[in-house]
Amino acid sequence: MNEKFLQAQVLYSFLELEPYILLGLLVFCSWLFYKFFLQDVSEERHRNLKNHHRVLFRHFLLLSIFFGAYLLSIESAKDLPIMDRLTPYFAIFAFLWGMIVFVKACRLWVLQYLFLQSMQEGVPLLVVNVFTLMVSLGLGFWAASKLFNLQIGPLLATSAALSVILGLALQDTLGNLFAGISLQLDKSIEIGDWVEVVSGIQKAVGQVKEISWRSVLLVGLSDEVITLPNRFLAQAQISNFSPPDQPICRTQLFRIKYGTDVNLVKDLLEQSIIGVPEVRELPAPYAYVFESNESWVSVKLLYYMDSYGAQWRVGDRVLRHGLAILANNKIQLAGNEMLIHKSESNK
């Protein structure tokens, strides 16, 4: 291989046994991190991580083959002249696969760290992908400057005008990218959260399914798919109904006839909600008098639940259980009454 094209001696200086061992330790420690700290992740996360480790081990095996071929060619170059010509090719493949293993191992470390913070739910890949891109570009520029003697500084300076043009053309795209990164870093929303997004007269409610480099994907209450650009979310008011250890509070109103034993109604309603499995035992459900007049007394049943998306299904069960227990105890609900006064006109 032409020495003017490739700095072979510089390349050979990187292909030592120590960097190979360090890469092997990086891969092995990544596997140990998974075995000791990520055993409580969901089954889907287990399959995902195992697949990532299998791919990483395959690339490390290819690195070992190219590195072994390079060492063998170095030893055989004195006896076989053809091996001296093949050595740079084995070296460049070993160096390339070493960079691939390093990037994939770093990506897997970041991915496992994010999984450690979210054991059961999914992890948005935006930060992982941006990190992988930055590491890959950094390694690529560094390798080009070291091995091919390319001057990266002047090249970047001459492309300043092109960068400005691309920046203006991709203004919306870049805005969505950085808005998505900010959403990921401040963790205002995460995958699995139920959110309400309000901006002016526009409003969207749904469960977060994915955070990409361009948009956030929500699944609405009627299973409709809602795609919101990241810049829109960054400027909107977001209400998160899935904070950790914060149950959702809901109420159901029962209107009974005036004169009914209110204490009995409250006890019965609190007993009726025990049969609804989605309702939390703590904080305990509580019934209280909401309002009253000469015709009825309104009793409101307050209860807590974990799933925002199940509130209507759970509300239906709470209402049916409450009506059934009141009917079994012969307690009637108050109806609307209309009184008509008939007056005789003077003849």
Image (cartoon, grey):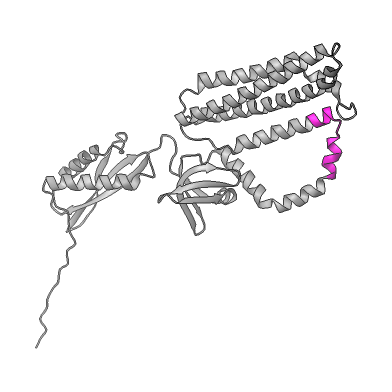
Say if residue 195 shows up in the picture: no
Say whether residue 73 is left or right of residue 135.
Answer: right
Viewer-closest of 281 and 48? 48
Q: Residue at x 57, y 30 (%)?
A: 111
Q: In the current view of this chain or complex, which residue is farthest to the bottom?
A: 347
Q: Main secondary structure of the magenta part?
A: helix
- Number of marks present in the image shown: 0
Q: Indicate the position of residue 183 as horizontal and vertical percent values.
A: 57, 42
Position above or below: 114 against 216 = above
Q: Indicate the position of residue 48 as horizontal and vertical percent values.
A: 52, 30
Position above or below: 176 against 146 = below
| Residue 20 is one of the magenta-drawn residues | no
> Would you identify the image quadrant in which residue 53 lies?
top right
> Where does the magenta region start and end?
143-158
User: Split into 4 quadrants, where in the image is the C terminus?
Assistant: bottom left
Say if residue 224 shows up in the picture: yes
Say whether residue 214 is left or right of residue 148.
Answer: left
Q: Indicate the position of residue 130 as horizontal and vertical percent values.
A: 65, 37
Q: In the current view of this chain or complex, which residue is farthest to the right?
A: 4
Viewer-closest of 294 and 193? 193
Say whether residue 135 is left or right of residue 290.
Answer: right
Q: Residue at x 39, y 45 (%)?
A: 309
